[in-house]
Image: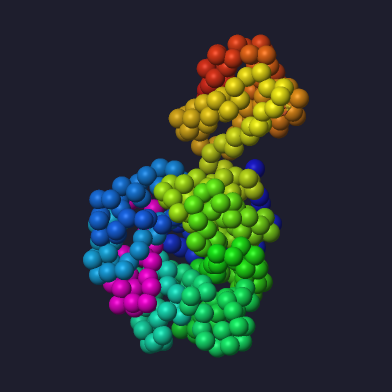
Amino acid sequence: MIIPITKRRKTQAIAIGGVQVGGSNPIAIQSMCDTKTEDVEATVAQILALEGVGCEIIRVAIPTKEAAQALPLIKEKIHIPLVADIHFRSDLALLALENGADKIRINPGNISDKNLLRQIIDSANKHNAAIRIGVNAGSLEQDLWDKYDAPTAEALAESALNWVKFFENENFNQLVLSVKSSQVPTMITANEILATQTNYPLHLGVTEAGPPPAGSIKSAIGIGSLLQKGIGETIRVSLTADPVEEVQAAKEILKSLKLYDKEPDIVSCPGCGRTEIDIQKLTQQVQEMVARLNLQKPYRIAVMGCVVNALGEAKEADFAIAGGQKQGNLYYQGELYKGNIPEKELLKEFEELILQKIR
Ligand code: SF4
């Protein structure tokens, strides 16, 4: 069951291409390509792979004219909104918008001339594109450095809010905001401040989180604690890894908070001295089987080494296995479905049970 929207912060919905972010919409999962954007073939291949695992919005770097000019070629082959990541160069922001970017991510503090920002706003209006104001420590304005002496949560939030005022004064409100930090407590507090002072959708992420598992854990703590408070409308887990892992980690964060209903949640016990089956192998096989069956519903699937906790888990689960002595029982919605199945037949019988019940 997805957490009702009433428990989430009220925000305005912003259209990013065909995906709405904020309002009553589900939390959108984003990632970013690590290909050269102008290498259209490689970029499209990566985006299609990301779409396949559940990425809903994709961002690409636009460091050159060639990258911006590749956007239409990429867009025609993908199925999710395309976001252009801009740093410093307003000319590239304009070129990306002309070439069909559904949203641009800029750090306004990196574009010092406000007239250039006004040109970007005009172009975003003309092309129906959204803008993410992405603030981080590197672009903190000098007056905020003077005031706070460091890129504190308060400083980052104030910077973002100052830019919101600028964009609103220019009559532009198709905004998404992000304040990212590699320091998890800073990122959490900065977003909490923003959440009390604006109703624009917030894009959550712990920047430079590092490789998994540390990067996934930092992201889960930062993003997860905010989501649990109803804050955050779109998320990106930044990992020094294949972006597919970012999307998988993002889905697990959402699933753990009951905020994702497009695939099952697998629970499994760690195994202990009571375990008489190969719980690690069986869990791995169940994961692969669930992925292969492409079950697009939030079934709860439990794989337990013995009956000690299995009966409790089985009651909560749609489908459950409880191991025994080289054998196991299968449960469906809390009821014993079949008992004493030899270990080597458990997986096959479990798959048959799932297929039978989802038909
Ligand atoms: S469910 Fe059973 S096998 Fe698994 S950890 Fe608990 S006691 Fe051990």
Which x, y percent locates residue 349? Answer: 56, 16
Q: Residue at x 61, y 25 (%)?
A: 279
From the top left corner, tell me how far across and down residue 260 is, in percent: 57, 46
Relative side of 143 to 189, left or right: left
| Front residue (pair 104, 282) | 282
- Furthest residue toward front: 273
Q: Residue at x 55, y 25 (%)?
A: 281
Q: Residue 63: where, in percent of width, then height?
A: 31, 68
Instruction: Give the residue displayed 40% in from the left and 81% down from the top.
Output: 111
In magenta, the rendered stretch is 77-101
Residue 141 seen anywhere in this rendered image of the structure: yes
Determine whether 32 is above or below 329 in the image: below
Does residue 222 appear left or right of residue 115 in this picture? right
Left or right side of 262 for 96: left
Residue 175 shows in this picture: no
Q: Nearer the viewer, residue 166 or 191?
A: 191
Give the quarter the ligand 1 occupies: top right
- Residue at the image position 67 percent from the left and 14 percent from the top: 325
Residue 87 shown in magenta: yes
User: Residue 177 at what x, y percent from top left?
Assistant: 52, 69
The residue closer to the viewer here, 110 or 138, is 138
* Colour setting: rainbow
Q: Quadrant of the N terminus?
A: top right
Query: In the image, is residue 187 above or below residue 309?
Result: below
Q: Number of marks in the image? A: 0
Q: Is residue 123 rendered magenta in the image?
A: no
